[in-house]
Amino acid sequence: FPSHDTADLIKAKRTEAGLSQRDLGLAVGFQGIAAPQIISNIERAKCLPPWERVSKFAKVLKADAKEIYQAMFADEMDRLEDKYKGLV
């Protein structure tokens, strides 16, 4: 991912909430040893949070779901612009 809007937002909100990556992963429904790795991947902009879990992220992080969605849309637009650069 060329942009890090979502990564930066999730990491900042998690740190502000005093949660470990494992704590956040488990709280939003990821299972076992995969929980911290998935959050780490999100915070390193390797992937986006699953769209269907954004409301859980917002609740756990005491964040506005709209803010998370906006960051995700910005990242996805950057990715698509990069992927299709030169085709338009």
Image (tube, rainbow, N blue to C red):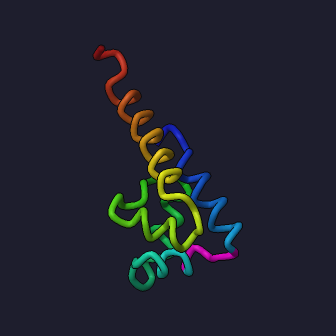
User: Is 48 located above or below residue 32 in the figure?
Assistant: above
**Image location of residue 19, percent across then percent down:** 64, 76
The magenta stretch spans residue 79: no
User: Which residue appears at 42% of the width and 42% of the height?
Assistant: 73
User: Is 69 located above or below residue 2 in the figure?
Assistant: below
User: Which residue appears at 63% of the width and 67% of the height?
Assistant: 14
User: Is 18 located above or below residue 6 in the figure?
Assistant: below
Q: Which residues are magenta?
A: 18-22
Using the image as rendered, state which of residue 67 and residue 35 is in the foreground. Answer: 67
Dividing the picture into quadrants, the one containing residue 85 is: top left
**Image location of residue 38, percent across then percent down:** 45, 68
In this rendering, position of residue 53 left or right of residue 66: left
User: Which residue appears at 39% of the width and 82% of the height?
Assistant: 31
Image quadrant where one finds the C terminus: top left
User: Which residue appears at 48% of the width and 52% of the height?
Assistant: 66
**Image location of residue 41, percent across then percent down:** 49, 61
| Dominant secondary structure, magenta | loop
Using the image as rendered, state which of residue 19 and residue 64 is in the foreground. Answer: 64
**Image location of residue 29, percent across then percent down:** 40, 78
In this rendering, position of residue 83 left or right of residue 62: left
- Residue lying at the far left in this picture: please name it: 87
- Residue lying at the far bottom in this picture: please name it: 32
